[in-house]
Amino acid sequence: MVIMAKFKRVLLKFSGEALAGDKKQGFDEATCMAVAEQVKKIVDDGVQVAVVIGGGNFWRGRSSNTIDRVKADQIGMLATVMNCIYVSEIFRYVGMSTEVFTPFECGDIAELFSKDRSVDALNEGKVIFLAGGTGHPYFSTDTATALRAIELDCDVIMMAKNIDGVYNADPAKDPSAVKYDKISLKEVYDKNLKVIDLTATCLCMENSMPLLVFSLNEKDSIINNATGECTGTMVTCD
């Protein structure tokens, strides 16, 4: 277990599937509520939180050969917007102020992303949701996560997954897979461990952005990882 200092500003990444719970699709309100209650505790403790959510609970266009890749990716971007709007409302329900940003115009649904507006919102104590990926096809929400974390000067990317860390093989397929308590981004790249996609890994390596990979399903895992205790795998920049 790696013990760290409490972070000031984090980017919290969820997969859409993680927030769908056992249903695998759509939203599981109990799961989202449990996440919101944890995030409120770290926000009340002074941690600034930005959130990116994947769109896999609604759309995985890369598995389809019938739709143009650009259009499929655009549908995926809109799926992340839906996710962020929904989860931001759950966060508001438990008592947090939120703001949703997108890299493209969405009328009065969301604000157009800029670093200055986003940092101002964080400094006001709001949880910000960064929807719509990078706004461009061929880039995943992993890449958007890395990009926004770097732009916003976050201390760390916190990746809440259905798995409790980084392994040397897929533990669902290989019962002998070994979990890493700590591993470098270079090792992740060299061993092709697919913690995040290749573009995001390179961005994090080039800009010294560490990651925490942990299970969303463990009790208080968001609180623990944001306030000093790595319960999964620390992915370092050295």
Image (spheres, rainbow, N blue to C red):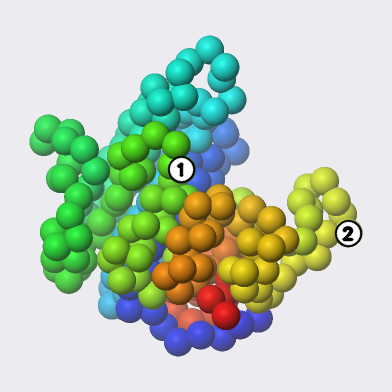
Please name the residue shown 30% across and 50% down the image: 130
Please name the residue shown 28% across and 77% down the image: 46
| Rendered image: mark on residue 140 | 1
Q: Are marks 1 and 2 in contact (CB under 8 Å)?
A: no
Q: Is residue 222 visible?
A: no
Sooner in the amino-acid sequence: mark 1 or mark 2: 1
In which quadrant is the N terminus drawn? bottom right
Amino acid at the residue labelled 2:
Ser
Q: Nearer the viewer, residue 157 or 43?
A: 157
Vertical placement of residue 86 versus 224, above or below = above
Apparent side of residue 163 relative to residue 221 in the rendered image (left or right): right
Vertical placement of residue 143 versus 47, above or below = above
Residue 165 screen position, x and y as percent: 65, 63
Q: Nearer the viewer, residue 56 or 96?
A: 56
Please name the residue shown 50% across and 35% down the image: 56
Residue 15 screen position, x and y as percent: 50, 46
Q: Nearer the viewer, residue 95 or 230?
A: 230
Apparent side of residue 186 relative to residue 9 in the rendered image (left or right): right
Apparent side of residue 100 relative to residue 168 in the rendered image (left or right): left
Apparent side of residue 131 relative to residue 203 in the rendered image (left or right): left
Residue 25 screen position, x and y as percent: 52, 30
| Rendered image: mark on residue 21 | none
C-alpha distance separating marks 1 and 2: 30 Å
Q: Residues within 10 Å of mark 1 (few under 14, many from 20)?
A: many
| Rendered image: mark on residue 176 | 2
Looking at the rendered structure, the secondary structure element under dot 1 is loop
Looking at the rendered structure, the secondary structure element under dot 2 is loop
Q: Residue furthest right?
A: 176
